[in-house]
Image (cartoon, grey):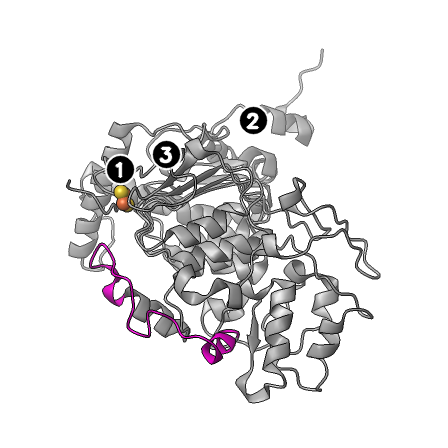
Amino acid sequence: HASMHISALPQEVMVRLFRYLGPEDLCRCSQVCRSWAEVVKTGSLWRHLYPVRWARGDYYRGPPGEPDQDPDEDWVQNLQEEGRAYQEWDEDADVDESEEACEDSLAVSAVRKEKKLLNGMIQNLLPAVGSSVRTLSLAYSSAVSSKMVRQILSLCPNLIHLDLTQTDVTDSAFESWAELGVCRSLEHLDLSGCEKITDYTLKNLTVGLGDLTAPRFSKNSPDCKNKLLKTSSSAIQLLDRHSGYSLGRARTALVFKWRPGGRSMSCSPVWVLDPTELADIEDTADWTRKEGVAGLGEGRGGILGVQAGGRSCCCRSGTRRSFRTDIGSTYFQQLYGTLGEKQCGHSACCGSDTVLRTVKETQCEPQATEGSTELWTKCPSEGEIRTEQSGACRALRFLSLSGCYQITDLGLRCLSQGGGLPLLEHLNLSGCLFITEVGLHELVSVCPSLNDEHFYYCDNINGPHADRASGCQNLQCGFRVCCRSGE
Ligand code: FES
């Protein structure tokens, strides 16, 4: 037998061999030569990413464990201590990150290594393999920033499992979901302990997941379209021209103009009323009721204008319900002030029957859109999932917002739009102090697969399935928000 050099092996064989290697070895191999570097950038080698573990020498790269598996307590504690040490070091460091200034403790160097690894992935690896990535776990990362998460999410549009537990991310991390129409395949989202997350993120999430509810009118038929178009300048505008993915072909025919905006929410596909072009506000309100699409669109004074003309919000009229903690006193003013919204976030206060509708209230008959090859099945409430060619399936099965105390009923309502979450089995809303039973009922009514054993919310709320749901998970946690912590 003539001996054969390894470089003569076909690429498929090399990929098979490389499958036995961990991420660290793969990185070394990529430095051997150009052709090996190419092989290392094969997507199937990078399906599951755990940079936090990798930075600490644990090179596991298999699929994620069971969702209910509790993380190792010592591991979590170590990471939290490292995070604290890194923060202190970072505050003291005089912008001098040179090697000389790097005589830091082991804890700090672990976080620095993690940061380096994340930057390396964003710059060198993910642009090549991002579309193959299915799992990304950044749980307890002290190095990750919102900007990094935003970059990663943009590069990894086919994520199935995303874990950002106890990170410092803000709403800006998720802007790409609405702007790029990604996260269609997302099944597992863990934002436990991400205290800076607000309803904005849930809006972006619901847009990114896609819309299962059909545009119910074709070019030639329903009256509602005629009503909308009865003047040349309609009062309704779709803010995102790129949003055909969530609104379907027929509805994109009603795109009037693109209105660029500063913040993320103004880039979401939302329907708003233009106060300067109000042709027939009653018809518009009627249309939104029929179509059930307003949920994504309680944008700036737009559809809310309908409500403002009707009844006023209890919070604004001095009957604001009191919160159990002090956190809430200025929160809504800030949040809805910046949105220009006149809502308090409570479903009960804000008249969901006037402004927003859930999928339960929309009609879901099978229907073909003219000229399209979209496939429609029955609506989720009838036990089947509606899919469309654009790929919307709202496949989320696991969602944890535990400790995201800024979430309100408005955020829950966003999730209930677009067809709800028909596959959701696990929902953790422990420590969400501002949600009420009304918001919970609204969301749960469009989550037919929810398993009560895996349904957690504050013990002080008399919400849906109260006798069977699992209550608040943060009572004993010690580091996550809970209205009864310290008791
Ligand atoms: Fe109320 Fe934990 S948030 S019991």
Amino acid at pointer 3: Ser
Q: Quadrant of the C terminus?
A: top left
Name the outermost residue toward the bottom: 276
Could you say which is closer to the camera, residue 222 or residue 135? 222
Residue tagged 1: 79
Tell me where residue 411 appears, x and y as whole percent: 44, 57
Q: Quadrant of the N terminus?
A: top right
Q: Residue at x 56, y 36 (%)?
A: 40
Q: CA distance from mark 3 to mark 2?
A: 41 Å
Residue tagged 3: 470
Could you say which is closer to the camera, residue 389 or residue 330? 330
Judged by depth in the image, the label closer to the viewer, 1 or 2, is: 1
Could you say which is closer to the camera, residue 129 or residue 237? 237
Q: Residues within 10 Å of mark 2 (few under 14, many from 20)?
A: some
Q: CA distance from mark 1 to mark 2?
A: 29 Å
Magenta residues, as a range? 303-330
Q: Main secondary structure of the magenta part?
A: loop
Q: Tell me: 201 left or right of 57.
A: right
